[in-house]
């Protein structure tokens, strides 16, 4: 009986010592190696997560900066754009002419501007009617604060209709116009005169190559 009890106690001591040895790296070196490997894996996982998080944060900041720069450039562009154009009406003896020419210009600086525009006009004189629709590109130069020089190229589609006794005639055609002008600049309003360098008395919409103008831009 005593022998069995002694055997059981000795076996329990051995198991306790083995457990302590497993927990103590100095007694059981293999468990220490496993613990070091676990720490290394944990450290590598932490470093990988840190690098991934830092990279994502850097990409996010870079995209935010690019978006901010693009937004700044977009805002800066529209801050330099002015909208306006010309509007004209003329009345006479059985004669009427109406012109509307909206446009937008970009101010490169205080001297030079360029832009695009649309042009629509209607004229009626006696039994004849005419309409003009087209587009244009224009350039403005202000060599002095109160002087504005302008150049505008137009491509116009002309539709003329003649109502004669027992006979109606119509014609459609395209005609170019190249206006060179000079005006007095008061800031938002410019008044002056311009001349059509491509004027054709048989095809041009207007009856004269010279034309006064008033344009407004905001």
Image (cartoon, rainbow, N blue to C red):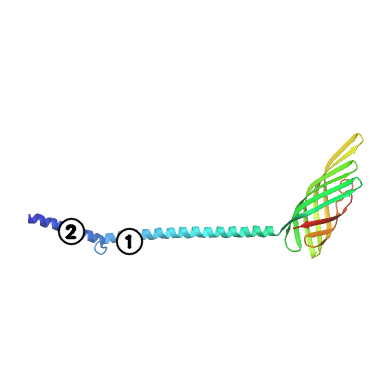
Q: Quadrant of the C terminus?
A: bottom right
Q: Quadrant of the N terminus?
A: bottom left
Toward which corner of the image does residue 28 lie, by quadrant?
Answer: bottom left
Image point (89%, 46%), residue name: 95
Q: Is residue 204 visible?
A: no
Closest to the camera, between mark 2 and mark 1, is: 2
Looking at the picture, how far across and down is residue 174, in whole percent? 82, 45
Toward which corner of the image does residue 12 lie, by quadrant?
Answer: bottom left
- State left or right for residue 68 relative to residue 201: left
- State left or right for residue 169 relative to residue 110: right
Image: 156 above or below 68 = above
The one nearer the camera, 69 or 24, is: 69
Image point (31%, 60%), residue name: 35
Looking at the picture, how far across and down is residue 133, in whole percent? 80, 46
Q: Which mark is residue 90?
A: none
Who comes first in sequence, dot 2 or dot 1? 2
- Residue bearing the label numbered 1: 36
- State left or right for residue 92 relative to residue 113: right
- Residue bearing the label numbered 2: 14
State the separation of the CA atoms marked 2 and 1.
26 Å
Mark 2 Cα-neighbour bin, 10 Å: few <14, some 14–19, many ≥20:
few
Q: Secondary structure at mark 2?
A: helix
- State left or right for residue 21 relative to residue 186: left
Looking at the picture, how far across and down is residue 2, in whole percent? 7, 56
Mark 1 Cα-neighbour bin, 10 Å: few <14, some 14–19, many ≥20:
few
Looking at the picture, how far across and down is residue 55, in whole percent? 49, 59
Image point (38%, 61%), residue name: 43
């Amino acid at each position: 009986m005593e022998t069995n009890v002694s055997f059981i106690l000795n076996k329990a001591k051995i198991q306790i010592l083995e457990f302590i040895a497993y927990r103590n790296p100095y007694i059981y070196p293999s468990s220490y190696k496993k613990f070091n490997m676990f720490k290394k894996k944990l450290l590598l996982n932490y470093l990988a997560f840190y690098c991934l998080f830092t990279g994502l944060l850097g990409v996010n900041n870079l995209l935010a900066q690019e978006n901010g720069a693009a937004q700044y450039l977009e805002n800066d562009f529209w801050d330099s754009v002015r909208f306006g154009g010309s509007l004209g009406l003329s009345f006479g003896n059985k004669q009427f002419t109406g012109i509307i020419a909206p446009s937008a210009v970009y101010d490169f600086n205080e001297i030079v501007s360029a832009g695009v525009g649309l042009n629509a006009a209607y004229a009626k004189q006696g039994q004849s009617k005419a309409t003009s629709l087209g587009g244009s590109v224009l350039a403005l130069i202000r060599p002095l604060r109160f002087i504005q020089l302008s150049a505008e190229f137009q491509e116009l589609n002309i539709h003329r209709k003649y109502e004669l006794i027992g006979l109606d005639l119509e014609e459609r055609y395209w005609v170019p116009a190249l206006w060179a002008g000079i005006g007095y600049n008061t800031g938002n309003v410019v008044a002056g005169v311009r001349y059509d360098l491509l004027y054709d008395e048989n095809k041009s919409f207007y009856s004269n190559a010279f034309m006064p103008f008033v344009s407004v831009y905001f």
